[in-house]
Structure formats: structure tokens, C-alpha cells
Image: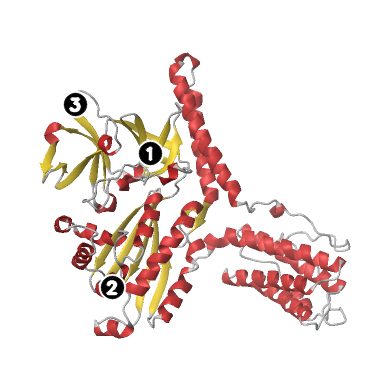
Amino acid sequence: MDMSQYRDLFVTESRGHITAFNDLLVRCESSAAEPGDIDELFRHAHSLKGMAASMQFHPVAELAHRMEDLLSKVRSGEFSLTPAMVDLLLEGGDVLGVMIAMVEEGHDRFPDSADLINRLGGFTREGASLHAPAPLPDRAGPGAPPGDQSAPRQHQFRQSDSFKTIRIRTEILDHLVNITGELITTRYRLADQARSCPEALLEEPLSHLSAQLRDLRDEVFKARMLPFSFVAERFPRLVRDLSRAQGKEVMFSVEGKEIELDRGILEEITEPLVHILRNSVDHGMEMPADRLAAGKGRSGAVTVTVTRDKDHVTICVADDGRGMDPALLIARAVEKGVISDARADTMTREEALLLVCAPGFSTAAAVSDISGRGVGMDVVSTAVHSLGGTLSIETEVGRGSRFILTFPITVSIINALLVRCGRLTLAFPVTAVDRALELGRKDIIDQEGQKACKLGDTVVPLQSLNRLLDQPSPKGGPSCVPAIVSGLNAAPVALLTDRILGQQEIFVKPLGLPLSRMRGITGGTILGDGHIVFVMDIRTFAGTNGDAPLPSPLRRS
């Protein structure tokens, strides 16, 4: 397994352990060491040994192991922490520091620490080592000129100690994102002012400022990025415990753990992924006897696959369980009053599968009749779309199911399509818009009382944003009407509006009470001219339940 992607994290964690180890060791020498202090010293050495072993840096692991053994004797009371032992352990800490610096610089050869390891292993209760000390290894490596061995060894600060990798509190990173977003807003304000003062000759400096802000944004986002493994490490235990509790046999794997996402997105998607995994094991996976009877192996498989395509990340949770039957889902939804008979007759397969996300879908009935899919899946759907993502489901009866979640890399600074609707300017994330177009009167058709248009072979229903948001319609009846088309939830809809203003990068701010209670709004932003713009959740207008009127996102829910 390629562990190179974890090298930086290993270096950072190791330096933290070595620094804490040396500081605590010096304190313990100057004052009586408490049992808790010895335990902490032991834990630092033990942690460093384990990390180095997992990264296959065996010389580092071996040295840390010998230091751990010596501290174990101190913990047990066999030895006491004497100045001679402190000298030896500090020497070990220095050599470990040299090794970690070489790891950071990409070297695969380490200084020979056999002598130090022997002295650590041969340390006696009387405070002496059975082996004479040798000079501290020179990190310059073989062939370097030897130093003055007659001079007493002193700690020397190396170039690698110049804090190439440091830890930063998450709130500081969040603050940097906020500042970057405000700078982007200010840049648009300057551009708006420049248009009214062409004689100021601001076009060139604004262009340079835009390029620099893009670089700043990219670097800040890099600092907030974390590998998917940061949250995936808890999934194997979750699947194991749940499958064992139910007497099932499940093999679990994660692919693409090195793919990085914004920390804010990772925080929000952890709970939805846990819920999907629980459903995959609890309701999607059959018992071993049932799998054998169906011609499958005793053990089922649940796989989480993470892939990245430009500025999007796709997470797929797949199982080879019993799958879902769309017809049974529709029948149960009608029985529970989630949809009407008329709506059931017109539902596509994709829409039927997404019924599991309907809040009113009965969990108990699903467990007995349709394998239990959809327990709390409305929470998953809400979390996904609040991040500007999409959720789709693929399944085959008897073969398993796939839950596919697609997210933008980050959600703080996004590209949005601005539209004018009555007195409002609204922003729709570009990731949620399939296309923008203009419809003539001849392009609008009537289908069973619903206005619609044809895009290729697909009939797409039309909704008026003005009507939905209680905004006045444009006067004069224009011959062409702008529309934006979205296919979220596999239920495409075209939203008619007054004017499409264009695409712009915006800094999305969360809304506080009472605005956060308004349905269909995921945040807000301020344009360069000072106008406040709501960032809309297009799923509000492209809902799967066609029987209920679409709610106004500017009314309280």
C-alpha cells in the first residue's frame, strides 16, 4: 500500500510527540516525576513507534520501541528516572528528530542507531549502560566531514526545525476563509465603482487583483482540505459491530481514502454516511443462509468509493444485498399517503427510488415489506442538498444498491448563477443548474394541465419563480422567457424567471434566526452594489412530490 500521501501528517504528528517527550523529560528531571508523567512519556514513545511501524519506517520504530521498553521499566518501578537515563532518552529524542527530518526531506536511508539501541537495551538499575556511547549520528550522512568529537555534544537547531509543517486551529482557518470571501466581495464592489468611473483606469489593476484573490482562495482552501480517511477510519468498526450483532457476515472496504474535501463538508457528511452504512448492513444485507439460498456467497460486501472530477467529489456507498423494488416502494408510499394514486402512475423509476427520502415514508412497513430502505433517509437527503450536492440511487432486486452522493469540493465560496425575479435577485449554485435557456411561446406546451417544454426527448415541467415567490410578473408579456433547468433528484424542472444576470463567484454566509427558518434558502451573499442576495436550494422547486404545491422559500415553514 502506498503510504506516501500520509508522510506530511506523519512528520507533523511525530514532531509533536518528540517535542512533548523532550519537554516533559526535562521537567521530570528537575522535579519529582509523577506516575502520570511517566505514563505520558511512555505513551509518546509508544505512539511514535506505532505510527512509524505503520508507515514502514522500521529504524524509527525500533529506536522508539527501545525507548518505550526502558520507560516501561520505570513505570513498573524496576528502574528510577536518573539523570543518566534522562541523558540517554534525550539522546534518543535527538536521533528521532534527525530521522523525522530525513523523512520530511524524502530520504530513505537513516543514520545508524544500533549503538544507541544497544545502550538503551543494556541500561542497568545502577544507572549505567553496558555499552559505551558512540557519537551522535551526523545527519549529513556517509562521506560528510566529521565534526569535532572532543567538543561536548549540544543540541543544534537544524534547518528542518524551521516549522515547515505546523498545526493551525480550525477556527483560524475558518476566519481566513471568511476574510477571503469578504475580499472577493470587495473586489466586485470595486469593479462596480470602476464601471461608473472609466477615467480611473482600474481595469488592469482589478484584473491583477482578481488573479491574486483566486490564488489566495485556492491556498486557503488547500489548508482546509482533509483526506476522506479522516472520517472513514471509524466506518470499519461500525460495519463490523452492526453485522456481528445481527449475525451477518459483511466485508467492508474503502477506496479513494486519499481524496481530499473541505473540512466543513467532511463534518456535514459524516452522519449521513453513517446512516447509509447502517441501512446497507441492517436492511440491505441478507443473512448468510438467505445469501446461500440465493446463490450468493455467505459474506456480503459493502464498499465506499470516493472519486474526484475537477471541482466535484463523488462518494458511492454500494452493497451486494437484496436491493429495492421500485414497484413495492410506490405501493407502500401510496398506502401511507406519501403520494397519490395519480402521482404513482406517472413516477419514473428514479423518482420511485427516491421515495425513501420522503419524510413520511414508514420505516416499520418498509422493514417488513421492502427490505427497510429509507429509514431516516430524509435526513441524508437534506444534508446532501444543504451542501449543494446531489443524491441518486441505483438498485437491482437481488443484486444490491448504490447510493451516489456528489458534492462540490467546498461550499464557502462558490460559483453561482444570478437571476432576477420581480424585486428579488437570487443565486443558484452552478452545480445545481443543468442549463439556462430562453423559451418562446411556441416552445411551451400543455401536458395534462401542466405547462411544460421539451428538451430533446424529455418533457420538463415549467414552474414560475414569480408565482412561487409572490413576485410581480414582468409587464408586456415578453416573447421569450428565460428559464433555468435543474435535474436534481432525477425530477427535472425548468424555472421561469424575469432575467438571467450571469455567473459570478460569491461568498456564501449562513443565515441566522429567523431567516434560517425559511424553506429553500441555504445562505446569503452581498453583491458588489450592496444588494443582499439569497442563495436558493433548487431542490425546493424540483421536489419529488408533485401533488403538493411548491413552497415559497420566502415564507416561514
Residue in view at x 59 percent, y 58 percent: 8
Tell me where residue 503 sits by quadrant: top left
Residue 212 visible in the displayed image: no
Q: Depth-wise, is mark 1 or mark 2 nearer the camera? A: 2
Element type where label 1 sits in the image = strand
> Are discs 3 and 1 less than 8 Å apart at CB?
no
* Residue under pointer 1: 416
Seen in the image, is 124 located left or right of residue 263?
A: right
Tell me where residue 396 sits by quadrant: bottom left
Seen in the image, is 66 located left or right of residue 333?
A: right
Q: Position of residue 239 (x, y in %)?
A: 43, 73
Mark 2 is on which residue type?
Answer: Ser
Mark 1 is on which residue type?
Answer: Ala
> Are discs 1 and 2 less than 8 Å apart at CB?
no
Tell me where residue 552 sits by quadrant: top left
In the rendered view, would you say 555 is above or below 224?
A: above
Mark 3 is on which residue type?
Answer: Gly
Q: Position of residue 2 (x, y in %)?
A: 50, 66
Residue 468 visible in the displayed image: yes
Tell me the distance, in whole angstroms, between the alpha carbons under discs 3 and 1. 27 Å
Q: Position of residue 351 (x, y in %)?
A: 23, 57
Q: Position of residue 387 (x, y in %)?
A: 41, 50
* Residue 477, numbered circle: 3
Looking at the picture, tell me which residue is in the foreground, 411 or 122: 411
In the rendered view, would you say 327 is above or below 77?
A: above
Residue in view at x 52 percent, y 48 percent: 222
Q: Earlier in the sequence, mark 2 or mark 3?
A: 2
* Residue under pointer 2: 371
